Image (cartoon, helix red, strand yellow):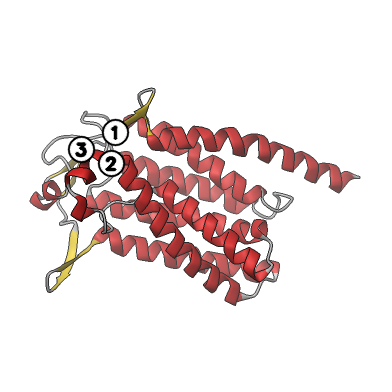
Amino acid sequence: MITIGIDPVAFSIGSVNVMWYGIMVVLAVVVVIVFALMEAKRVGLARDHIYNAALWAIIGGVIVSRLMHVIDQWDYYMENPAQIVNFAGLSIYGAVLGAMLAVVIYCLVNKLSFWQLVDIAAPGALLGQAIGRVGCIIGGCCYGLEDSPFCAIEYVHPSHGLYGTPVGVPLYPTQIYHLVWNLVAFGILWTLRTRLKPKGTVFLSYLALYALGDLVIRFFRQGTPFIFGMQQAQVIGILILLVTVPWLVVKLWRGRKQASG
């Protein structure tokens, strides 16, 4: 049993509570940018494009992420409309989709290769998501079903209950599952990033790896059924796998054919 007794609120500035989750998200963004800068230097892309694209991606990611979370929890927000405009809940797939759309626009405006830019960002994104899961562990969000599996998590701080986390009951440690999978996927992608050809294969591999892990882990995670008993994110994950895996296979096949021909 892993007992979490840390207050999800790191500190307060007046009436504003600064959450551990928010701190970890900021740290995750910094890590993604740092790794993207390292990759940009390796492939010869100007650093300014990383900073500018990151700003666009953050704005797009936050907007779409929040929108998808509100849609997923529609009944709650219809009863509490004042809670719609805040950052208490975000959708990871919404963040990825919003960031992608923003980067597409940035690349069109600046006549850059979209595939090159997202390939540069992909490995660091997985590491950033792993860091974000540390915030989930401390904050109590994304918690698992009530049960007593190996290494179950139990939240005991009263503040966790205020933010909707079950207090005093053993839960599947799904946040830890997510963290470990993200680290494993990062290790795979970081090792293979220079060997995956042509452009776009690193990013497609990132999407496939993340979607596969998220799809499986969510069977042990608390969530609202969306369709066929599956959560919204699981349906999205299946769709991502149906698109990215065949696309990745075709890209890799064409890359090898061009290299040999």
Which residue is under mark 2?
73
Q: Is residue 12 left or right of residue 223?
A: left
- Expressed as whole percent of the image width and height from the top left, the position of residue 30 reads 43, 68
Q: Which mark is residue 224?
A: 1
Q: Are marks 1 and 2 in contact (CB under 8 Å)?
A: yes
How busy is the neighbourhood of tag 1: few (under 14 within 10 Å), some, or many (20 plus)? Answer: few
Report, in whole angstroms, how far the alpha carbon at label 3 lies from the one at label 1. Answer: 26 Å
How busy is the neighbourhood of tag 3: few (under 14 within 10 Å), some, or many (20 plus)? Answer: few
The disc label shown at residue 183, or none: none
Mark 2 vs mark 3: which is more N-terminal?
Answer: 3
**Residue at the left extreme of this rendering:** 158
Quarter of image, res 53: bottom right
Name the residue that disc number 3 marks.
1
Sequence order check: which comes first, mark 3 or mark 1?
A: 3
Q: Position of residue 188 (x, y in %)?
A: 57, 46
Inspect the image, locate mark 3, and give the three-letter code of the amino acid beneath it: Met
Disc 1 to disc 2, C-alpha distance: 8 Å
Of 100 and 195, the residue lying toward us: 100
Q: CA distance from mark 2 to mark 3?
A: 30 Å
Image side of residue 83 versus residue 208, left or right: left
